[in-house]
Image (cartoon, grey):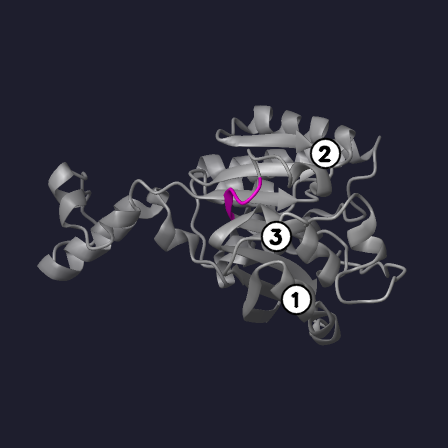
Amino acid sequence: MDTRLDILKKGLESLDLNLSEVQFQQFLDYYDLLIEKNKVMNLTGITDFSEVVTKHFLDSLSLIRIIDFRKMLNVDLKTRINLEINRNLESNKDSELSISSNDVKSFPNKKNINRTYRLLDLGTGAGFPGIPLKIVFPELEIVLLDSVNKKLVFLQEVIDTLGLKKIEVVHGRAEDLARDSAYRESFDFCVSRAVALLSSLSEYCIPFVKKNGVFISYKSGKFEEELKKAEKAIGILGGKLEKVEMFQLPDTDMKRSLILVRKVKNTKKLYPRKAGLPSKQPIGEKPVTVQRENVE
């Protein structure tokens, strides 16, 4: 019988992710905290370990299908330098290589070495996708935003227990926080697995994104009609649809989609509108009753 660690490693290998023992343990500890706290508050309807790995951890990390953080972040610098030098010098692949300042200067992608990337997880809930992304990519700066404070208290406990750095929890509504100069148009990425129509979610998320940054929405396999209705809102808010990545969760028949919107111009000060309006009256649509989508 596979142990929890075996199940976790197998799942992460499906995304070509090879982690340290510390990172594997962080995932196991995160699961334990999630299940324990779920006994007293509603964090997730999924509690089986294998299902949590697939439907929460791997689903969260599927972002790498559309954004290659491994090439962007300094955390992968040693690996990339090793590959480059070994390829050029045909040296022993198993040899240890210490990185010198000369190595860094000669590396072709050195412009990204000191680059800091900031990501907002809007409507983070139990910490998905923000916490899994932080575990795998510790150099990514992450803000976890949610309007339910008790969930953020739980997430702070997770952060402290796992020893995560450069990650903060923020309590508030997107409509209010997006007007704060400390957050508005200050993120390279805004991601959300929150249950909301894409037209509404765009108004919540795009104002946080820098020009040339991206907003990525996690959706089920059925997204076409929702995307079509959201096109006007995306354009008005300063975005442009760049890519849709469709995939299937490993060892399941569950279809998923990642919708990537590029911020091509600044968002008008009018947006987001006051609390409640983005959901009740999405841009370009008649007032609607939000239909909840089961992302679990």
Is 3 placed above or below 152 here?
below
Measure the alpha-carbon separation of dots 2 and 3: 21 Å
- Between marks 2 and 3 in the image, the one whose residue lies nearer the viewer: 3
Q: From the top left corner, tell me how far across and down residue 79 is, in percent.
A: 28, 49
Instruction: Residue at 61% x, 49% y: name it.
Output: 207
Which numbered disc flags the more N-terminal residue, 1 or 3?
1
Q: Nearer the viewer, residue 119 or 14?
A: 119
Q: Residue furthest right?
A: 289
Q: Amino acid at mark 3?
A: Lys
**Pointers 2 and 1 in contact (C-beta within 8 Å):** no
What kind of element bears circle 3? loop
Is 107 placed above or below 33 here?
below
- Between marks 1 and 3 in the image, the one whose residue lies nearer the viewer: 3
User: For residue 52: magenta?
Assistant: no
Q: Amino acid at mark 2?
A: Gly
Q: Which residue is mark 2?
A: 172
Question: Which image quadrant for residue 123?
Answer: top right
Measure the alpha-carbon separation of dots 1 and 3: 31 Å
User: For residue 186: magenta?
Assistant: yes
Q: Which residue is mark 1?
A: 256
Q: Nearer the viewer, residue 189 or 94?
A: 189
Say whether residue 45 is visible.
Answer: yes
Q: From the top left corner, tell me how far across and down residue 189 is, in percent.
A: 52, 50
Q: From the top left corner, tell me how far across and down residue 276 is, in percent.
A: 83, 47
What kind of element bears circle 2? loop
Which numbered disc flags the more N-terminal residue, 2 or 1?
2
Magenta residues span 184-188
Q: From the top left corner, tell me how far across and down residue 140 is, in percent.
A: 46, 41
What kind of element bears circle 1? strand
Instruction: Residue at 44% x, 45% y: name it.
Output: 19
Q: Which residue is mark 3?
A: 268
